[in-house]
Image (cartoon, grey):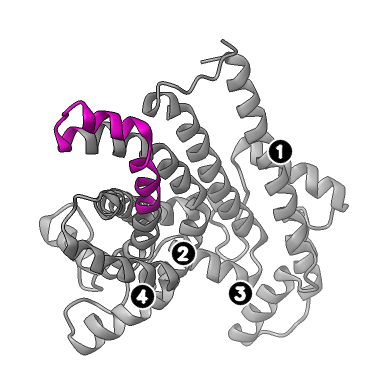
Amino acid sequence: MSWRYLVRRILLLLLVMWTAATINFFIPKLSPRDPIKERLQLAATQGGRNQTGLQAMADAYAHQYGLDQPLWKQYLHALLKVVQFDYGYSISQYPRTVNSVIGDALPWTICLGLVSILIAFVVGTVLGAALGWPRSPGWLRALVPVSMLTSAVPAFVLGFLLIYLFAFRLKVFPLAGAYSQTADPGWSLSFVGDVIDHAFLPALALVLFQLGGQALQMRGLMVMTVGEDYITFADAKGLRPRRVFLRYAVRNALLPQVTGLVMSLGTFIFSTVLVETLFAYPGLGGLINSAIQVLDYNLLYGITMILVFAVCIATLAVDLIYPLLDPRIRYDRR
């Protein structure tokens, strides 16, 4: 692999991160609301205290969060914090830092999203390859309309349907949450089973949402691949159908399939956030929802930058493993 190409890709990643950080910084500033004053007024109202000294407290907190500085200083400070992976204190959960708040929710999102997208990709790719192979059983064609339906329905709508059917009507799975309120968190088999039981419906909603699109895309790639000359030549040589299917058809259709997976990562992450909010799952979805309601600038900034960074790293990683999937791809000038 060419080092010049690797440097260009890393510079492009940094450019994307800078653009996302800039947009993420300025959009919340367009709101006329003052999150510091809102939090202090809420605390004063709930505590039955008067408003004496409220402005002074608001000014003190604004100075602590750097909100009293000129906009360009806030912007440079925010960029420096992005480089340091330090997003300061959470306005809504002070005195906790943004990193600690995200650190509690991130493992739930990673487990739910990563497992769901891997299952959807593997099953969707195998199913799509079988649908596009002319020698597959005819009954598989009945799955094409089902795949089109699930790919067209948003993940949170599928989540509503699953909640109504399996949690409300049949009462097979829990309605919401990550584990039972009476459960004792730990690595015991009972707690792990309880977590899996609560994660089944949100994971199923994400898998069904991604599965149909993956299957239809792989089916289209297989249809185009089957018509290539090397497939006809492999059949003429008398190779076994299984080898033609795996080594010639699936292997050549897999590269665009991986590219499509990377292209859909942004949509999948957004769907994961919505599904987590719907199921009251303790991941980044609930944090984003609460941060938007109270306009927690620092928490919103940290979550968004982590999501953008994850998509950029995934894109770079897949781009670098392309030569392993297809030896014809070279990033050097030879």
Q: Is residue 223 magenta?
A: yes
Q: Name the mark nearer the viewer: 4 or 3.
A: 4
Q: Earlier in the sequence, mark 3 or mark 2?
A: 2
- Residue 253 or 278: which is nearer the viewer? 253
Residue placed under numbered mark 1 in the picture:
80
Magenta-colored span = 218-243
Tell me if 268 is positioned left or right of 10 in this view: left
CA distance for labels 1 and 3: 26 Å
CA distance for labels 4 and 3: 23 Å
Give, as a three-letter code, the residue at label 1: Leu
Residue placed under numbered mark 2 in the picture:
271
Residue 33 in sight: yes
Where disc 3 sits, the SS reads: helix
Residue placed under numbered mark 4 in the picture:
159
Give, as a three-letter code, the residue at label 3: Gln
Q: Residues within 10 Å of mark 1 (few under 14, many from 20)?
A: few
Answer with the quarter of the image where residue 215 lies. Answer: bottom left
